[in-house]
Amino acid sequence: MTDFPSSRAALPLVAAAAALLGAGATWLVSHQAGGNQVREYLLAHPEVIPEAMQKLQERSNAKVIAANRADILTPVGSAWAGNPNGDVTVVEYLDYNCTYCRASLPIVDKLIAAEPNVKVIYRELPVLSLESETAARYAIVAGRQGKYRALHAALYAGGPLTEASMDKALVTAGLDPAKVKEEAKSASVEAMIKTNLSLMRPLGMTGTPTWVIGDRVVSSVMSLEDMRDAIAAARAK
């Protein structure tokens, strides 16, 4: 029989169980951190561990979100969709060279139709290429000019990013390419991108798309059903 880990090694695991189980588990952590009662409980209820770890992560996320509320939950100009006064906000961190972000477009559209009391905010997270950063800069400028959704759609419709595809997207969105490119070089645009990138580690982002829904952070494509479940959980808090 494998021995239960030493109390030092076991504490993170047991603390996770305590986070989910409340007072009963807290008693175990306090009195039996290295003992058989904790081991036996966790062996009998292994489903506790992922649930508890998610709960701990959500608590950590809540602190990060509260400390950076404006940078996460305030859209850049028109970089949002859905209900402006929605009771739940879904934030999508995206890269315009990300095929999974492109695949999420119809899912977001269905979400907005299915959840009329949800607001969706788009935030740039250019991590895949130099072209990704260029497109992100253009998108921030477009948001400030009230043309975000038009450029958002046009950039994805153009396929993998190139200088030519981005220029075409700017024109399609009704923007002046020369003016956008000039403003895209501004310090304020660069600062906004750096702020988004700086939140990757605190929020545990591992790629794009990353979704922030309530206190949940998910770095992957989400189905409509999973999004609605996360929204329902956020509403219930």
Image: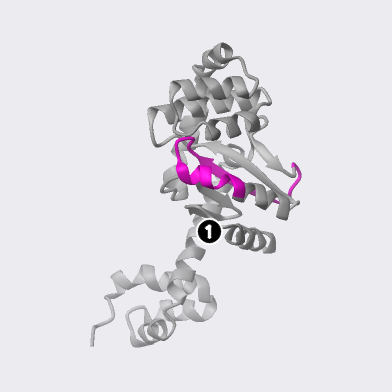
Please state the horizontal and vertical placement of residue 75, each as a whole percent of the image: 64, 35
Q: Quadrant of the C terminus?
A: bottom right
Which quarter of the picture shows residue 133? Answer: top left
**Nearer to us in this view, 153 or 38:** 153
Q: Which residue shows up at 56% across the image and 25% down it?
A: 169
Q: Amino acid at mark 1?
A: Arg
Is residue 35 visible in the rendered image? The answer is yes
Q: Position of residue 21 (x, y in %)?
A: 52, 76
Q: Is residue 100 above or below residue 234?
A: above
Q: Nearer the viewer, residue 139 or 163?
A: 163
| Residue shown at 49% from the left, 17% from the top | 185
Q: Is residue 188 visible?
A: no
Where's residue 80, x and y in %?
66, 38
Q: Secondary structure at mark 1?
A: helix
**Is residue 67 in the magenta section?**
no
Total tally of numbered discs in the picture:
1
Q: Where is residue 106 drawn, in percent x and y?
A: 61, 47
List the residue tagged with mark 1: 59
In the image, residue 134 sits, relative to residue 90, either above or below, namely above
Q: From which residue to which does the magenta span run?
A: 84-106
The residue depicted at 51 percent of the width and 25 percent of the height is 137
State the colouring used for the structure image.
one colour
